[in-house]
Amino acid sequence: MRAIILCTILLTSAINTFAQESNTTAPKVKLPRATMLKNSTVAYFDEPTEVDTLEGLFSEGKFHGRLRTNTFYYWWDTPDPKHDIHLISGVGGSVVYQSAIYKGFDFGAALYYSHGFVKEKEDNALFLKAGKDAFSRYAFLKTGNKNMAVLGQAYLRYNWEDETQLTAGRQIVESFYTKSNDTKMIPNTFDGVVFHTEMIPDSVIQVAYLDKQKLRDHTEAHAVLMRGDCASDGCFDDTDPEQIKIATLSENDDSAMHKGLTYTRLKAEGKPTDAPLMTADFHTSFDYSFEIDAAAYYVPELLSQAMIELNHEMSIGKLRIIPGVRYVKQFDLGAGSVGGASLSGDLNATNTKSYKNFDSLESQMIAARLVFKADNYKLNLAYTYVLDEADLVTPWRGFATSGYTRSMARYNWKANTKSYRAEVVRCTSTDGIYNKVYVQASLLYQDNDDRKSSLQLDDSLYYYVGFMQNIAALDNMQWRLRLGFQQFLNTSPKTIDNETFKDSDLNNLDSRFEINYFF
């Protein structure tokens, strides 16, 4: 109840802020060397230039430093060993080097560090939520190490004219299906080759071949679509439930990862355990009012997916109205027979039997939205529906419902899930410097198919509010506060595995406070 009151107050405050904004314009300030944008990507304003000598390739390069702290408080209505109230902080930073450009070539590297402040006896690392990315749970449970020091980027790039680049190595890859998702301490990066071009007028094309992924809480690269187990990790005791759980953290353990695509199952079915991820993205616009986006991914012998989206902008005076639609189609290339239709991967669970074809990952999603923009404000009314076929698989931090019904940490990709969201945004920047407070507030209603959840969870409401601002006296520093509360609507008792509880026992509050300083 206290969490509901808190979220209600914050949402009310956000709406009042929209209504009471001053008409005065903030004085223009000098741009800092770098900043974090509202989508959690880093923008560099002091980029290297072209040079005429090989020596200049190195001497005219740029170093970018960053200090960062992130604190996570997760509260449960009715705590138990698997739903533990916890407070975790991470402190760290990064050093990024970007060389100058010599005859079209340049290179870059980035070192990242994070130390997680976690209470060993009180916090169960196996069941942590957002704060788990402040350190590596795998390393912590194996050795007790709370530090992450990683080479997050190391790439070589060749640049042509017309904004065309070919980049090879470990790098950040921003596409529809792959994101840096830099909301914790270390971004999500990939090992591979990426081709990006804007040579076609008003269009962008990007194609990538990604051999490995390094998730935010990992110190080493791992398979893009394989979940670790005792056979791949070498458990000391493969009958110990805790050792088995730790082994699942060794490879792709993203929350959107299909838990049934394990090393052992893939091997048994003759499927690759190290298959690459191939992605393609296309964007074009016509007369600045009609936009087409298309994207696809392909993992050989396992899975692929395709997306197409249309947006059209119309103006009525100062009001801009932008209707949009998105369609996603998932193709099963053999992964369904290995792990089943449910992301849970449990082929014998009762909830798995609710899928119409529980050994197929063929699936679809439809989405629609209506966006209103006026001056400094945006209203986004959106709907998504994952058809009653199979769950969507996108474990590379790009989400099929993004821009429509995805709020912070809400993953509405389960089959037969309908989601409705109203979002209000006040954006106070056009250059990434938020001198006034950026505010985002939303209300999400999820119509879940309770048969497909292992806990048979019913419908829920999710209240979200987020704030962001660059500190006026020190514009290289930026703070962020994000709060999300999930309220389950079914309060009737239920008994599962001899345990009686109510959905409302799992009501939860996810709160995050972050400070970034760039230099």
Image (spheres, helix red, strand yellow):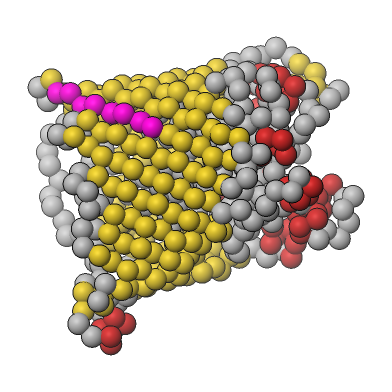
Q: Nearer the viewer, residue 336 or 41?
A: 336
Tell me, yes or no, if residue 17 can be seen here. no
Question: In this orientation, does residue 45 appear?
Answer: yes
Magenta highlight on residue 310: yes
Give how far across and how far down residue 498 sits, in percent.
86, 23
The furthest residue to the left: 317
Stretch in magenta:
308-315
Q: Residue at x 49, y 21 (%)?
A: 385
| Dominant SS in magenta | strand
**Residue 424 locus on image (x, y percent):** 32, 27
Q: Looking at the image, is 298 positioned above or below residue 108?
A: above
Q: Nearer the viewer, residue 61 or 481?
A: 61
Residue at 60% over, 35% down: 332
In the image, residue 320 lies at what x, y percent? 18, 25
Foreground of the two, 432 or 154: 154
Q: So how many labels did they put on this image?
A: 0
Q: Is residue 434 left or right of residue 491?
A: left
Q: Quadrant of residue 292?
A: top left
**Residue nearer the viewer, 224 or 446:** 224
**Quadrant of the image containing the C terminus:** bottom left
Picture residue at 20% right of the left edge, 58% below the top: 162
The residue shown at (62%, 43%) is 302
Quarter of the view holding residue 68: bottom left
Residue 449 figure quarter: top right
- From the viewer's perspective, tell me whether residue 411 is left or right of residue 82: left
Q: Is residue 366 magenta?
A: no
Q: Is residue 392 shown above or below 415?
A: below
Question: Residue 188: x percent and y percent?
Answer: 50, 54
In the rendered image, the residue lying farthest to the top is: 492
Placement of the N terminus among the 4 image quadrants: top right
319 versus 511 height, above or below: above
